[in-house]
Image: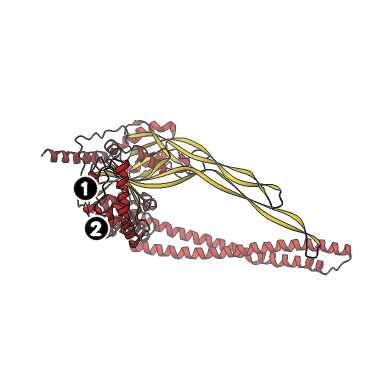
Amino acid sequence: MKEILEPMKEYKQYQERFDSLIDSAFGELVKMSQINVEQNRETVERYNHADKELRAERKKLSTQRGLKSFLIFLSVVGGLAIVVGGLMLYTAISNGSSLLASILTLVSGPVVMLCSILPICLVINKKIKALRESVKLLKQNADSILNEAWEQMTALNRLFDGDITNKMVNSLDTVIQLDRYYSVLHEVYLNRYFKLPYFSDNDSSTVNMIVGTIADNPFVISREFDVEMGTKTYEGFLVVSWTETRRDSNGKTYTTTRTQTLVATVTKPCPYYGNETFLVYGNESAPNLNFTRKPQAKGKDDKQIERMVKRGEKKLSKIAEKDFKHGDGSFVAMSDTEFDILFGAFDRDNENQFRLLFTPLAQRNMIDLIKDSPYDDDFYFVKKGKLNTILSHHGDTWNMLAGRNFESYSVDIARDLFTNYNKEFFKNMYFMLAPLLCIPLYQQYKPNDMALDLSAETNIAAREAEMMANILPREYVAPEGSSTACIHKVKYMPSMGLVDNIVIYSYAYATIARVDLVPRVAGNGRMYSVPVHWDEYIPVSGTTEALIFDANGLSASKYAELMSLLKNYDTASDNARADAIAECCGVIIVVPQVEHKVALANKINELLKDKETNPLEELRKRFVNTANEMLNKKES
């Protein structure tokens, strides 16, 4: 596997190579599917023409409906004119005043009604009826052509799976290798040897993960959906009026009306939800070193960076002086002031190991990344012993696994989806890993534990189970009465063979509309109560029992049999919008009918015995073999 020793300089060539892999991979998929590309393009062209005709006819129908509504409004106005004209005529006769206005109003009413109703009855209704029939026929035609296009793409759509992108990355044969999903072996390995907690925080839930290794050292790119209780300010308004008596310049009194809009606010608790994407990487290099860095040059151009570096020498001197007086006196500025200022790890606690990591090449790589990254200087770098954490702003907008749905009725649309997603995937992944790739030692130092204990009590990792819970349709996991997003956590019950039995704990909020009356004084000196509407957020929670397991390695026929079995035993009703099942990268979660849960687990176990491969065993061998290789090298 080739090392990436100068990530910024090498990025372009790897992106170009990956782009060519994207083209060839899609071409190979089309070839394997044996779909007729030209026939599909012709069908799509016919559908586009039919859809254009349908939209044009719908526009005509909408115009006629709008005209009918307007004429109905006019007829109502004509009816009101008759009533008003009659009242005016009665009043005029009673008062002996002129009858002209009342007669004109009374006569115009029937005329307006007649001119409105006749076109509706004689013309517009017939047009609307004809257009409805036309729209119906055109829609049937468009739907028929669209179904034909989908049918033509069936074979290709079946070939899209979540592993294609990983295989393309791995085929570059670099130190970066991606795994299919976050297995229980990843979980145990990262926890026991690098101290990564099994679960995310209680106020967050894992929604996406990309897993792999750099030179056989494990990394996980994880997206957490979290909630934080804050406050929200609500505004209310009340318009008040009063009369005042005044004198003009001639001394005469007159009254005037004044109005004023009173504004009031209230601040109440409110939950805020958001995503945070971060990378964790385990490496035994510099195991006693800890530091943090945050963006130093974000939004700065070259001249601003140059000025910042020039001022940095004084800053480094002050840090060294402060450390000498109040710390252990170990802080020593790097010879490359530009690196020290731009990287900004001023709280490092082991100078020898810091210099071991940041060789002159590593320093230059890091400077190039900070100054020339397409995402600007947007990354945070935290090292705590053997565990490295990278957070970056661009990671939060990355369409990670959720974008791997390339199914379409059009081969050209599918190609665009496939190409755009994979190009962005490689770019985002590369620059998420770039701070680590800048350090050559991280690609040269491999795991060297003498004995790896990768035993586990579950089949599926906790964070993977959380992610799968977030993929399930909301209707099966959201607490009753909830009106906000949910945080899902999992708890393991005793496993049933190859099937894990879990309980999903879901936390959300119900909202109740409230009104506070806030006193405000108007310009007339009186006190008014201004209504301010606000929402009270009431915590709600619920639990859902689910089964989760790894279906990788099943043959196509066994997989189809498995999915049919799950649909027969899941908790979805006949009129449910979606099945109570979710799948990602071969891991499947199902919300079963409680009374049939054990029976379903037993049947799943029977099917899983027929796996053609055991991905976990293969991964276990890779982890153990890597450690044994390093041990043998040490002994020799």
Q: Nearer the viewer, mark 1 or mark 2?
A: 1
Q: Give the secondary structure at mark 2.
A: helix
Please state which of residues 10 and 341 is positioned toward the viewer in this rendering.
Answer: 341
Can residue 210 be seen at all in this image of the molecule? Answer: no
Q: In the image, residue 280 lies at what x, y percent?
A: 31, 44
Please state which of residues 631 and 567 is positioned toward the viewer in this rendering.
Answer: 631
Residue 453 left/right relative to 322: left
Say which residue appears at 79% left-offset and 69% top-offset: 104
Which image quadrant is residue 543 in?
top left
Q: In the image, residue 307 lies at what x, y percent?
A: 33, 59
Please state which of residues 584 and 407 is positioned toward the viewer in this rendering.
Answer: 584
Q: In the image, residue 472 lies at what x, y percent?
A: 42, 42
Residue 391 left/right relative to 227: left
Q: Give the secondary structure at mark 1.
A: helix
Instruction: Give the distance between the C-alpha atoms of the residues marked 1 and 2, in whole angstroms.
Output: 17 Å
Q: Which one is earlier in the sequence, the residue at label 1 or at label 2?
A: 2
Given the image, on which type of amino acid does mark 2 rest? Glu
Which image quadrant is residue 602 in?
top left
Q: Which residue is mark 1?
A: 441
Residue 10: which numbered mark, if any?
2
Which image quadrant is residue 615 in?
top left
Give the crowd class for mark 1: few <14, some 14-19, many >=20 residues within 10 Å: some
Give the crowd class for mark 2: few <14, some 14-19, many >=20 residues within 10 Å: few
Where the C terminus falls, by quadrant? top left
Does 586 appear above or below 141?
A: above
Does 182 appear above or below 399?
A: above
Q: Are marks 1 and 2 in contact (CB under 8 Å)?
A: no
Q: In the image, residue 12 lies at what x, y percent?
A: 27, 60
